[in-house]
Image: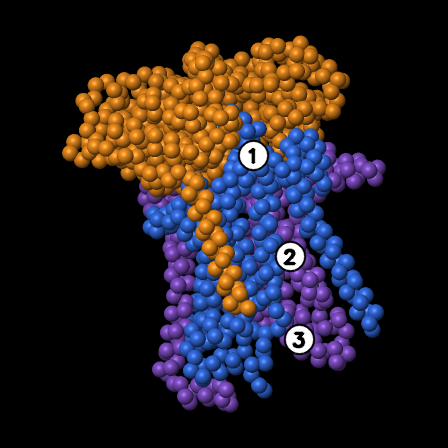
Amino acid sequence: MKKQAKKILVLLMCAAMLLVLAACAGENAGSTAGSSGNDSSAANGSITEESGGASGELKTVTVAIPTSYDLTDSGEVQDAINAITAERYGINFEFLFINMGNWQQQSNLLLTGDEVDISAIFSTPLATYVKNGQLVDLTDYYAGASDDFKGVWTDEELRGTSIGGKIYAIPNMRNFGNYFGLNIDADIAAEFGIEEGQRLTFEDIDAFFAEAYEKYPDRYMLAPHGTDNIMGEWSWDGLGDTKYLGVLPDCGQTTTVQNLFDTDDFQDFCAWTRKWYQAGYIMQDVLSNTEGWKTMIENDKAISSLDNYGVNGLSGMIRTVILDAWSVSNSYSALCYGVNINSKDKDAAWQAMEILYTDDEVSVLLNNGIEDKHYVKNDDGTISFADGKSASEIGYAMADLYWVTPYSATSYPLDVNGPTFFEDLLRFNKEETLLSQGFGFAFDITEVTDQYTACSNVMDKYYKALLSGTVDIESTIAQANDEFAAAGLQDIIDAKQSQLDDFLANQ
Amino acid sequence: MQTITTPDTAIKRKKGKRARLKMSLALLSMMAPGLIYLIINNYIPMAGLVVAFKRYDYGAGIWGSEWTGLSNFTYLFKTQDAFNIMRNTIGYNLAFILLGNLFAVTVAIMLNFLKGKYSKKLYQTTILIPYLISMVVVSYIVFGFLSQENGFLNNLIASLGGEKISWYTQSKYWPVILTIVNLWKGFGYSSILYYATVIGIDSSLYEAATVDGAGRWKQVWHITLPGLKATIITLVLLAIGRMFYSDFGLFYQVPMRSGLISSVTDTIDVFVYKGLTQLNDVGRASAAGFLQSVMGFILVLSANFAVRKLDKDSALF
Amino acid sequence: MVNKKIGGQVVLNIIFILLTISAIAPFLLLLSSSLTDEGTLVREGYRFIPKNFSFTSYEYLFQSGSKIFKGYGVTLLVTLIGTVSSVLMTLLFAYPLSRKELPFRFGFSFFVFFTMLFNGGLVPTYMMWTQTFHIKNTLWALIIPGLLMNGFYVIMMRSFFTSSIPDAIIEAARIDGCGEYGTLFKIVLPLSKPMIATISLMIGLGYWNDWTNSLYYVTDENLYSIQAILNTMISNIQFLTSGQSTVASNVDISKLPSVGIRMAIAVIGVLPIMVIYPFFQKYFVKGIVVGGVKG
């Protein structure tokens, strides 16, 4: 019996090792880029090239980027990039693509040591990162940067990623503001005479739903945008706080901080969703739903969904506008790139940062992948995924995540977004978006942390339930406000107000 | 084999001090790998618990960060939910310990009495399945049962003429629901340990009892249960030490993060997680863990002390 | 008398059949949703019998081919090496603890027990393993931290040794000239088969189900276990729909693995255990041979 057990054990171990080896053989063994000597020509207005004097050593900079796809070919892309940067700048890149779901946990652990040099700031506010001492003050680095680099963002925009007057991160390329509107299934929209880009009010939508419901009673009129929440946010600016404990309502066009539940914006919105919930336009299980809105509409389970969007395209549906494009105070700092305080070589990290924003070749590789393997160019200047594959099948799908990488504007847009996508995006950001009056403000939670955690819990209880119309508005808000009062919401609001006043005074 | 003389005299006569030393060294050497591992994995990092009393700065590291006294602990008490989360954590754990062990012991004993080799194996395998399913997937399954529109329970209720219940918004059902889910998920696994102990009980004892005319129930009461006593006490004591911890997946995922029922589904761990996601506050998170450990420790020491008084051998140490 | 016995067996069987149904039914639900096509799942929800049979979820999984196979390979390797090492370490630690002759016995027991209650926390542990020992992104990161020796199993084994291995047998071995190691491996071990099988199973399950070590210590996709893959997928989707990051609402969730696929991964994570477990059960053999000593 023992012999048999031993045999089986050995067999299993061999099987396991074979499996791992076989699978690994299919992988490309990413070898490090050919290290060439590091002499560079004199720098003149371009990126300071590493003329490491006598050393000629290759410096490795690790960059952590969030992603939502399996990037199986990231090693290849990294090699291609290093083939360029090693020779041109003496920098070797190592890209750490981390899944967004794991981002918070993994990036925090990475930042305790020197494993990463440049990291995205994502999922937690920039202010938190700075408060925890995780980032390097980049003000001096920026002052000494190349002209190319300084030309990417205006000083005004950099205020969006500064805390206390010091630059802690560099913004990345995406839409900083959002339109808020209703996405409607294209066929249904055509049936009921609603056009792309049309402006709608809630009353219009109500009438539309009533008509559509008569014809399609087995479908939901409104699918939840956030699977378990009708919509994540609307016309209130949380001032950098995703729990909305104290907001600037009215698209940020005021400077008085208020309790979200007391604002008209919120109460009006909830009144509508309450009406729709009770009429059956919204699914009864909305709070426990796990399906995405797009899937639901494509499968004829729903006909429309609220959405926030910039200039990106959408297939099979039309977009309408309810709120004109506006941006919240922390729009720039919600996703940006900074340098780890524990980085081994901060100078090299800064240099790498400049490369990521100014080198076109690197940008195309990082944002699109390798030509013909991951994408093919179309005649109109856009690209499509190679071999007709979709984003989840292709080995490198960062083209679909143009809004995550540091600077994608110098790469090629995807077919679904159109050839002028990046130009539109830049114009959208600089000209078309209404800025909240609290732009650039970051709330410092330190004095009120205890109240903050207590109020966070209260907000978690009621926010989604109220927004989705699942409970009676008045009584629930009254109940919530009682709990808020006990938890110290007023302290938070007062603190926010005084900090905001100081911030605005120092402009 | 030689005839055996009484062990004590044998040792004293034949071995002596040097042999005893050799024996001790051998035993100690056996423990060496484990000791090294525990020191590296558990004890050295324990020094990091000081971060519970500091404002952790990533640049300064654990030792360079500044002290803040007890301020990292206040957030656990300044909320009016403090009572709720305490009550929930302790309440659920008590219910789980009681019901869970009762159920597992019963199943183990029943398995033992079952005749039929193949049916025993089959049942043992199938009841382990719930343990293998991850809690998030379990939450999807529970949703399949409790969904308001299409859930099995609601369909059943509707077909019997009743009104559908919105399970995820009513607090009153959840203590029962969560207890059932926890029992369902764990009983197959917990019964393994008890079963292994039960089958170790000397069968000659049962034979003797049958000869004496004792029925099934009497046998269980007088033979099986005492045989399990040590195991049960050990497991219960260990569980008491974890009284202030909870299964995060169970309390965070299964209620589908519905806010309306959180007053009965939030435990300390869930509260800490939800409160700190935006803050990334290592000090505060560590403070919560520290408190949970200390309170659990005090509790288990007291329980162990009580057990020691009653039955010295059964105590943990 | 005979009737009673049969009657008892029937009752027992019925109870177990009910328990089995309650345990399997949800699994069948899982299985059937993994075999249904996406559209039907969205429209109709979960059912016990798939309405529209479809293998698309499994096709998707095995088409990203190397990932799942690699995951299996990693999981198998880690579980095997981990379980064997861990059981060995636990044995070596628990046996001396059960001997009254061990000096500082109480101290060592407490030493182990204390680790079950107090924990330095994630950050210090992480720093220890990555900065001092550099195990990040290696296979060891999946085997060593936290799982290699657990106080719980040490205590269980110690209790077992003290209550089930009579001193007489140990003394006999010593008198025969067996050293401590010899006693442990030649005499005690064969007598402890049920306990060792049990502990191996539990430790093995611990390794099989673990995904937190992957989360903390591994960023290299090649080292992801099956559970880590499943968990990453699910956390991705939960994060993106939680509203925690307003920017992340840009992600098109419909491109991420659907419910059917997540169910399929859950199924393939469970199946191997179900296959191996009966193999373990043969070690739950009745009776320790207490009759090694006469009189």
Q: How is the image coloured?
A: by chain
Q: Residue furthest left?
A: A54
- Same chain for labels 3 and 2? Say yes or no: yes
In the rendered picture, chain C carries what hue? blue
Real-space CA distance between mark 1 and mark 3, rounded to the nearest whole angstrom: 53 Å
10 Å neighbourhood of mark 3: few (<14), some, or many (≥20)?
A: some
Q: Give coordinates of residue A494: x percent, y percent.
A: 49, 27
- Mark 1 in CB contact with mark 3 (< 8 angstroms): no
Give the number of the disc on residue B125. 2
Counting from the top left corner in percent of width and height, residue B44 is at 38, 55
State the purple chain: B
Which mark lies nearer to you, 3 or 2? 2
Q: Tell me if C40 is positioned left or right of B19 in this view.
A: right
**Closer to the observer: label 1 or label 3?**
1
Please state the horizontal and vertical placement of residue B162, each as a whole percent of the image. 82, 37
Disc 2 sits on a residue from what chain?
Answer: B
Compare residues A412 and A31 and report the one nearer the observer: A31
- Kind of residue sitting beneath label 3: Ser
Q: Looking at the image, is mark 3 or mark 2 earlier in the sequence?
A: 2
The residue at 35%/49% (across/down) is C134
Residue placed most toward the observer, A250 or A218: A218
The answer to whether the residue labelled 1 contacts the one labelled 2, judged by CB atoms less than 8 Å apart, is no
**Residue tagged 3:** B203
Q: Where is mark 1, residue-wise? A: C257
User: Residue at position x 46%, y 76% from top?
Assistant: C183
